[in-house]
Image (cartoon, coloured by chain):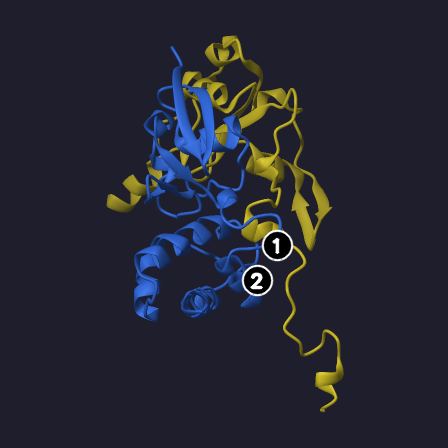
Chain colours: A yellow, B blue
Amino acid sequence: MSEAESFKYVGQRTIRPDGFDKVTGRASYGADLALPGMLWGKTLRSPHAHAKILSVDVSAAENHSDVMAVVTFDDFPRLKNESVVAGEGAADILDLARNCLADDKALYHGHAIAAVAARSEKAAKEALSLAAAKLPMHTKIVKRLGE
Amino acid sequence: MTKAHVTTSVNGDPYEFLCEPGETLLTVLRDDLQLTGTKEGCGSGDCGACSVMLNGRLVCSCLVLGVEAEGADVQTVEGIGNNDSLHVIQEKFLEHAALQCGICTPGLIVSVKALLEENPNPTEEEARYYLAGNLCRCTGYDKIIRAVLDAAQTMKEESAI
């Protein structure tokens, strides 16, 4: 018998400890949990890659009976351009905040503009369709290139 | 909106539930019946994570309405194997390490069972083609295919005895 064959685990085919739960569908993932009073979150995202946000009207979404909270960039404190230590290097805290939730401009397709928390997923989806954001696509660069 | 009253059978057990007309079978199974073994991947029929059998037909439960389950026979991953013993397919998935994160696994187990019921002796190509609707981002499919072919072989030997 070689040395490797004498090990209990090294060089052996082992069965995953979480395998049984996963092949039977019993494994509990985050999305499988349902707790009393749980709220569902949904995010309104920019349909454009680069757009100026003229207005965000969330009043209709806030009035929905099952909506508990709606947030936009205006709900957060105004940060200053300030360098902070973040992970592997320094980052600008205002840039980080703008990356989480768009301020006056959507910087990429899918950039978060507003977020809602509601009593059900359905209510959260309805609230998103009620929240109106005006954001014309920013075409300045495209036009310049075409000139 | 008025909710629809649906009487159905899931894994052989009778169930009754109320659902919105627009609610999918997937949300009914997961949220109303608490059968969370069936996973939601894409919600648009691309990934196969929500695969279930509806009247013997393999379907994406995210593309089926809850009301369509009226009078139907639904089979989910919870109905495969039991407390004492796993189904051969499940055993082979473990043996060949055909899973990692496990989100695609319940859908795949249901699909593989459907494949082997239709074609108990698939070639590698047939197995790959049949399971093309089940996406897995962890394994690279090779281990899954090895598990499927081994399961087919084992089931054939078992039925021969």
Give left or right: position of A80 versus B105.
Answer: right
Helix, strand, or loop for circle 2?
A: helix
Task: Tell me the chain of label 1.
Answer: A
- Residue at 30% across, 42% down: A142
In the picture as drawn, the residue positioned furthest to the front comes out as: B161
Q: How far across and down, in percent of the image, does residue A110 sit?
A: 44, 37
Q: Work out whether residue A50 or residue B106 is closer to the camera in this orientation and state it.
A: B106
Residue B79 is at least partly visible in this image: yes
- Residue at 66% across, 76% down: A12
Number of labelled discs? 2
Q: How far across and down, in percent of the image, does residue B128 sit?
A: 35, 64
In the picture as drawn, the residue positioned furthest to the left comes out as: A147
- Residue at 70% across, 84% down: A5
Residue A20 is labelled as 1
Q: Split into 4 quadrants, where in the image is the C terminus of chain B?
A: bottom left
Q: Which residue is mark 2?
A: B94
